[in-house]
């Protein structure tokens, strides 16, 4: 169980990005954080993974205060994080990255199983270097696969996993998320605007303007969210501009 | 007689495990420590200076010839000339690593001049690993010179790596390519401390449809300094590409000076260069997989130099 208590984060410029955010991310469940762009969702994900340090509040993992832990220690205690923008390397290939995440050697069959979850064929990708030769979608799927391979994962955080992924691979990814939440004791936290991801969630939290504006079970939140979205569309069908 | 230090260096630079299969010559402290020719690959002493003449028969396929050199005693300045004549249609691997070691406070140097003359359609994979070992303050130098003459439709791939421990190196490579010939060079250099490395490539694409691809990757750590110079001259319809990528760490410095010369309207020449420290996001990504910052840097550098 991951608990976020009164978490606040401010940019060096003084701009408040998160204001006293409190949330519980239950074990074995899929929680989706959604909300308008610029509302603070990605910032919250980075704070959980340790990429940023809060100016106030606490993060608790299984009751232990991990607020001061660095990225490495959080990872070693089971927190995985898939970047919204995949990182590219010159010389590190797909096998390297998955094995680093799993912290052991993986045979081809295991790698095939992991890559299959994100719609990639291991034969084509196992030795591919994660550099600019990969398309954005390929790099994104490998980024997600690197988190799915994580050893002793407790909380897996995915920042907009749907971005840059084609429909077929997205279906594979939805299956993978459903299997993860059904069969294991991992907590899944997904930052997303995608309706299909919201539909498979157990819990939904809406973050807007740095605060949690709604939180509850999918049944409690989703209907209202979709209704609001329709109401916010202009008569010509053009989406309301993000603030 | 091969002593323990030489054996260790041979293992690192040429995968020696007590013996070689096929043709070989082991040079140790300026002398021949073992030699064997094969039916298709003949190794003989040069008549006009120290070194070898290696004749590879036309049509030789799949054979490997090993010519590693080690210097393990301070005070030795080893100069050697090795000439390779690769016959028409041959397809071989040449392994020519070098290790220098000094622990007695005296300098050591290996200065190897390798000439490759490839006949029509010949293919060569040339592998070269360099390393310096030993404490005591003596300077460890390796200064390789590689001169390449490629005949029609020949192919040479040079895979060269300086693993570490070499205090100074000046690596000079030149090539002249005939019609349809292809030259691929992959160079990787790691320097640390106060080490210096200078690389100098000069490739002339003289034959129609010849091509060269030169990729240099280097890591400069500590207070080390590296210089990269390359010149590709396109003197006919040809394609040339050179790429210099360097990672800086600590106070490492790199000077890259690429040069392209097009002497023909149909010459297509490209150069790419990038110098900088390891991207912070790369380190962070590996930290999110459980590596410490130091482990992440090491892994990124390993991958960079391997790739």
Image: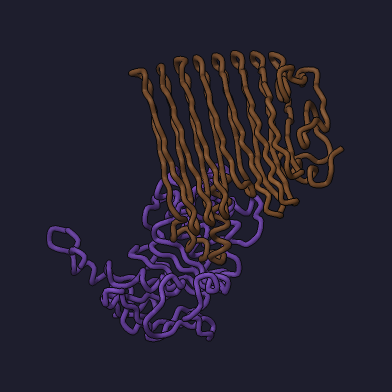
Left or right of A126, for residue A171 = left
Identify the residue shown where x is 28% and y is 72%.
Answer: A39
Left or right of B107, for residue B191 = left
Q: Is residue A186 visible?
A: no
Most extreme residue toward the right, as rendered?
B1
The residue lying toward the viewer, choosing from A61 and B141, is B141
Residue B185, how many percent across, how many down?
A: 54, 32
The residue lying toward the viewer, choosing from B76 and A196, is B76
Q: Is residue A146 above or below residue B255?
A: below
Q: Quadrant of the C terminus of chain A?
A: bottom left
Query: Colour scheme used in the picture?
Result: by chain
Residue A240, how many percent across, how many down?
A: 18, 64
Q: Colour of chain B?
A: brown
Q: Is residue B150 above or below residue A173?
A: above
Identify the residue shown where x is 81% and y is 41%.
Answer: B17
Q: Which chain is drawn using purple?
A: A
């Amino acid at each position: 169980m991951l608990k976020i208590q009164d978490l606040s984060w401010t940019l060096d410029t003084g701009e408040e990005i998160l204001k006293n955010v409190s949330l519980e991310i239950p074990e074995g469940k899929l929680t989706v954080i959604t909300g308008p762009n610029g509302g603070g969702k990605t910032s919250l994900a980075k704070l959980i993974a340790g990429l940023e340090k809060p100016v106030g509040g606490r993060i608790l993992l299984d009751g232990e205060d991990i607020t001061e832990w660095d990225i490495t220690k959080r990872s070693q205690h089971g927190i995985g994080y898939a970047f919204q923008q995949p990182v590219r390397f010159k010389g590190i290939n797909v096998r390297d990255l998955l094995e680093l995440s799993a912290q052991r050697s993986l045979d081809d069959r295991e790698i095939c199983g992991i890559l299959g979850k994100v719609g990639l064929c291991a034969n084509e990708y196992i030795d591919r270097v994660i550099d600019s030769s990969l398309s954005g979608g390929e790099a994104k799927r490998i980024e997600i696969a690197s988190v799915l391979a994580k050893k002793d994962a407790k909380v897996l955080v995915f920042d907009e996993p749907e971005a840059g992924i084609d429909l077929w691979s997205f279906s594979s990814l939805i299956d993978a998320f459903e299997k993860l939440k059904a069969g294991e004791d991992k907590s899944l936290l997904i930052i997303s605007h995608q309706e299909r991801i919201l539909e498979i969630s157990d819990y939904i939290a809406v973050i807007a303007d740095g605060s949690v504006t709604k939180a509850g079970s999918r049944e409690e939140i989703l209907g209202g969210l979709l209704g609001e979205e329709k109401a916010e569309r202009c008569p010509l069908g053009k989406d309301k501009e993000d603030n | 007689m091969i002593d323990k230090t030489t054996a260790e260096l041979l293992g690192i630079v040429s995968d020696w495990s007590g013996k070689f299969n096929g043709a070989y010559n082991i040079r140790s402290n300026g002398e021949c420590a073992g030699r064997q020719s094969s039916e298709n690959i003949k190794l003989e002493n040069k008549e006009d200076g120290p070194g070898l003449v290696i004749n590879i028969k036309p049509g030789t396929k799949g054979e490997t010839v090993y010519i590693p050199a080690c210097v393990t005693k301070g005070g030795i300045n080893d100069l050697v000339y090795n000439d390779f004549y690769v016959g028409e249609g041959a397809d071989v691997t040449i392994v020519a690593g070098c290790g220098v070691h000094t622990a007695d406070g005296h300098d050591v140097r290996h200065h190897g001049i390798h000439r490759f003359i490839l006949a029509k359609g010949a293919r060569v994979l040339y592998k070269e690993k360099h390393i310096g070992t030993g404490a005591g303050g003596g300077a460890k130098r390796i200064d390789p010179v590689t001169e390449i003459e490629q005949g029609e439709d020949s192919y040479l791939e040079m895979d060269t790596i300086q693993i570490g421990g070499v205090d100074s190196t000046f690596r000079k490579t030149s090539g002249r390519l005939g019609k349809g010939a292809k030259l691929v060079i992959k160079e990787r250099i790691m320097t640390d401390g106060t080490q210096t490395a200078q690389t100098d490539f000069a490739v002339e694409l003289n034959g129609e449809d010849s091509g060269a691809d030169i990729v240099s990757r280097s890591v400069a750590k500590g207070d080390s300094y590296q210089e990269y110079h390359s010149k590709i001259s396109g003197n006919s319809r040809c394609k040339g590409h050179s790429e210099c990528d360097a990672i800086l760490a600590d106070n490492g410095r790199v000077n890259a000076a690429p040069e392209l010369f097009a002497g023909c309207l149909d010459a297509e020449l490209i150069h790419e260069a990038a110098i900088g420290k390891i991207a912070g996001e790369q380190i962070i990504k590996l930290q999110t997989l459980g590596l410490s910052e130091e482990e992440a840097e090491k892994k990124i550098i390993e991958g960079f130099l391997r790739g």
